[in-house]
Image (cartoon, helix red, strand yellow):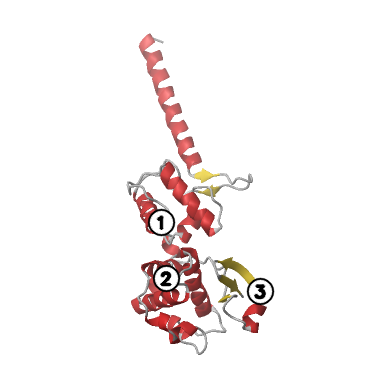
Amino acid sequence: MTVYKAFKNFFISLLVLTVLLAATAAGAAAYAVNKDGGESTYAVSKLGSSGDEVKSIQRKLSSLGYYNGSVDGIYGTATKSAVTAFQRNCGITADGICGNQTLLYLGLGGSTSNSTSYSSSDVELLAKVISAEARGESYEGQVAVGAVILNRVKHPSFPDSISGVVYQKGAFSCVNDSNWYAPVAESSKRAAIDALNGWDPSGGAIYYFNASKTNDAFMHSRPVVKVIGDHKFCM
């Protein structure tokens, strides 16, 4: 074998090895091992990722007040820190990886979104109730109130529409007080969309109440599944 052929074969072998290593690295990058050593889960976007999806994540995190950087589509340390802070606030695994669950909580869950099944008037009404009922609550608390209303729509014991749930006799006192006529907060509009997109910080609750403002024995008897701000969310 000539020196030329030997060098050529070595170069081809090196090229193949490089491609294989790159493919392996890419495959490994698509998975993140859970901290407890459990089964790996698919990571949609993570540190080092780039593209339009990352831009969408950055825009969403920016609108929620978690991200102050530029929307450049590069998943750097600032984006990872913002994702981690959002995950921690939502009570999900805070690993800085924007996988399917985190995308769902951000309202970027793609096919899991069901907001298109509701009319614009439904969205406006949901935002109005959230604004009136959760004024002064955290953003998570606002989304949770919206989620309770949607959980009632799906529940057999309640009306099967947003308007039916909202205007059910005695369901929401806000429809009869001054808060109902106050301007709808911008955060409540975003919270309505996030709730419609599937984010449910309430843990599936169908009731909520402010323990310091109600003595209703029925509400206080309900099993509490989560507490967010001044509201107890229960079944």
The residue that appears at 42% across and 70% down in the rendered structure is 192
Residue 126 seen in the figure: yes
Sequence-wise first label, 1 or 2: 1
Q: Are marks 1 and 3 in contact (CB under 8 Å)?
A: no
Dot 1, how many residues are within 10 Å of its Cα: few (below 14), some (14-19), or many (20+)? few
* Amino acid type shown at disc 3: Pro
Residue at mark 1: 65
Q: Give coordinates of residue 41: x percent, y percent.
A: 54, 49
Q: Secondary structure at mark 2?
A: helix
Residue at mark 2: 192
Residue at mark 3: 223
Q: Give coordinates of residue 159: x percent, y percent.
A: 50, 85
Question: In this rendering, is residue 131 above or below 34?
Answer: below
Question: In this rendering, is residue 82 above or below 181?
Answer: above
The residue that appears at 57% across and 78% down in the rendered structure is 213
* Amino acid type shown at disc 1: Gly
- In space, the residues marked 1 and 3 are separated at their CA atoms by 32 Å
Q: Nearer the viewer, residue 32 or 173?
A: 173
Q: Secondary structure at mark 1?
A: loop
Q: Are marks 1 and 2 in contact (CB under 8 Å)?
A: no
Outermost residue toward the front in this view: 212
* Amino acid type shown at disc 2: Ala
Q: Nearer the viewer, residue 181 or 104?
A: 181
